[in-house]
């Protein structure tokens, strides 16, 4: 490690340094046009000045704007300049769900785009002081106000809160401070070799953790980010054209997004000559479609990445060999300074090479769940093996092991381990077998604990008979699904993952 983060005490220093070096360079580009580094700095300081008059230090500011609008970034950084922190919201979410988020967050203010004025007004009872982006951005920056807020700030102050769904239905507000994000930024740029010439292609909405790679690493480098419109991936050929016309060299998406583009037939060999870094994150990556992307982006390095909203990066695998369609692609070796434990079902350390629940410790770990001590204490555990040390771990809920090559292999979720016809099994193993079937498009398996039945959902041209006959030669009888439901198309959520919650509503006990 290169002594990263030694002198940086606020994420704002990245913006200020890049604006000083490259004021006229495009920082973020969307359908409206470019926001240069100089303009980004000016906007963030104007918004910060206006917000500082409305909020107390270390207060949350909710941001209700389009999730791929470049103006989100000055709104985020403006909240930080004001001495607070930001929480991106999804304006497409149901109003009741947004209200639930806000009741958990208790923001001092909410910044909204004028197109969501009606929605913002309806949330006023839970949102604190609501104010439009346009009003804030037109204020003149006041150096004395900004300097006073900066003097009171600490590297340990919360920078952002990102919402994830909780298993109980109550949202979890994952908090990250400046120090964690600085450490994350520095290690990310080092691991992937990003430079000021990298052009990041942002496909992940700003309320999703995957988008972090498209905000702070570019800010630190003075690189450019092109925000791909939400509709782009719905039209795969246009998506490929957009990547080329925008000269994108780095792309991070969920495997589901890569699968969708690959299955469309839009990826001709050599179709993406400018891509240099392709990163998969968020789900198991299917080899057949990954291979198609490798042929299309034949100058790129491909990475399979493992992390979470709470832990950020844990491990990454630079793909250097071929796999079979039903083989799990490793997530590689641990990042420098990441420490990992595998715990067995009794809470002891699993034997070397044996699977166990994954616990992670790192310098960029979340500080916990905002305003939720009970869940924070359950998920963030000090010294889980009782060794008498003060090391803090995040309990991921995933289980995995290290293979013979020293690579981390994530085998699935602990809550996806089920007992089916008296046998303990893991749904991820069934899904890997499905991905290995010739002609498989996309889908997943769900378990109904009330009935004890496993459901297989899929789209594409395969028939139920094709699937059953294919699985019988790959899996023992007790692992075969009980019900098969063909879909016109697999649903995806706002984070571009398979929407298992939507599918679960179709799983009913007989």
Image (cartoon, rainbow, N blue to C red):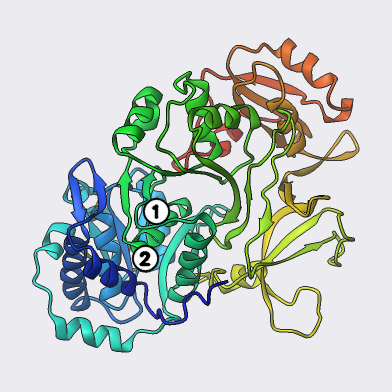
Query: How far across and down, in percent of the image, does residue 254 sit?
Result: 52, 41
Which quadrant of the figure contains the N terminus?
bottom right
Q: Secondary structure at mark 1?
A: helix
Q: Residue at x 77, y 58 (%)?
A: 357
* Residue 28 in view, yes or no: yes
Query: How far across and down, in percent of the image, does residue 319 sit?
Result: 63, 42
Picture quadrant of residue 336: bottom right
What number is the disc on residue 220? 2
- Residue with the mark numbered 1: 214
Cα distance between the residues tagged 1 and 2: 11 Å
Q: Residue at x 25, y 76 (%)?
A: 82
* Residue 510 in view, yes or no: no
Numbered marks: total: 2
Query: How far across and down, in percent of the image, does residue 368 sit?
Result: 55, 70
Picture quadrant of residue 64: bottom left
Which quadrant of the figure contains the C terminus?
top right
Between 165 and 245, the one lying in front of the other is 245
């Amino acid at each position: 490690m290169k002594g990263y983060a030694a002198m940086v005490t606020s994420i704002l220093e990245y913006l200020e340094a890049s604006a000083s070096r490259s004021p006229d360079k495009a920082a973020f580009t969307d359908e409206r046009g470019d926001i240069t580094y100089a303009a980004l700095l000016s906007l963030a300081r104007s918004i910060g000045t206006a917000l500082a008059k409305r909020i107390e230090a270390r207060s949350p500011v909710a941001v209700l704007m389009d999730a791929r609008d470049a103006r989100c970034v000055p709104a985020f950084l403006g909240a930080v300049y004001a001495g607070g922190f930001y929480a991106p919201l999804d304006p497409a979410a149901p109003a009741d769900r947004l209200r639930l988020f806000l009741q958990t967050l208790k923001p001092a203010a909410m910044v909204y785009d004028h197109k969501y004025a009606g929605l913002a007004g309806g949330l006023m009872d839970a949102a604190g002081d609501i104010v439009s982006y346009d009003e804030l951005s037109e204020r003149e920056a006041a150096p004395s106000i900004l300097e006073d807020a900066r003097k009171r700030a600490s590297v340990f102050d919360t920078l952002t809160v990102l919402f994830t769904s909780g298993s109980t239905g109550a949202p979890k507000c994952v908090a990250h401070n400046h120090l964690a994000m600085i450490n994350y930024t520095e290690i990310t740029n080092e691991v992937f070799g990003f430079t000021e010439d990298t052009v990041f292609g942002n496909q992940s909405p700003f309320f999703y953790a995957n988008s972090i790679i498209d905000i702070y690493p570019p800010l630190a480098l003075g690189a450019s980010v092109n925000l791909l419109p939400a509709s782009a991936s719905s039209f795969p050929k246009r998506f490929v054209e957009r990547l080329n016309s925008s000269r994108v060299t780095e792309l991070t998406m969920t495997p589901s997004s890569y699968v969708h583009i690959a299955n469309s037939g839009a990826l001709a060999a050599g179709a993406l000559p400018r891509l240099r870094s392709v990163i998969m994150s968020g789900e198991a990556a299917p080899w057949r479609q990954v291979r198609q992307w490798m042929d299309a982006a034949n100058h790129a390095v491909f990475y399979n990445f493992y992390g979470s909203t709470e832990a950020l990066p844990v491990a990454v695998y630079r793909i250097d060999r071929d796999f079979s369609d039903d083989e799990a692609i490793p997530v590689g070796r641990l990042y420098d300074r990441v420490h990992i434990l595998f715990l067995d079902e009794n809470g002891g350390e699993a034997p070397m090479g044996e699977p166990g629940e994954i616990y992670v410790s790192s310098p960029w770990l979340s500080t916990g769940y905002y305003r939720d001590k009970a869940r924070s204490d359950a998920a963030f555990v000090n010294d889980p093996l009782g060794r008498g040390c003060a090391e803090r771990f995040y309990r991921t809920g995933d289980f995995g092991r290290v293979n013979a090559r020293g690579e981390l292999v994530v085998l699935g979720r602990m809550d996806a381990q089920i007992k089916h016809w008296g046998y303990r099994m893991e749904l991820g193993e069934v899904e890997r077998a499905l991905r290995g079937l010739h002609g498989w498009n996309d889908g997943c398996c769900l378990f109904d604990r009330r009935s004890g039945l496993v459901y297989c959902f899929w789209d594409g041209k395969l028939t139920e008979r094709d699937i059953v006959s294919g699985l019988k030669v790959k899996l023992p009888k007790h692992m075969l699904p009980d019900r098969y439901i063909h879909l016109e198309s697999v649903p995806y959520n706002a984070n571009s993952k398979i929407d298992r919650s939507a599918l679960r509503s179709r799983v009913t006990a007989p």
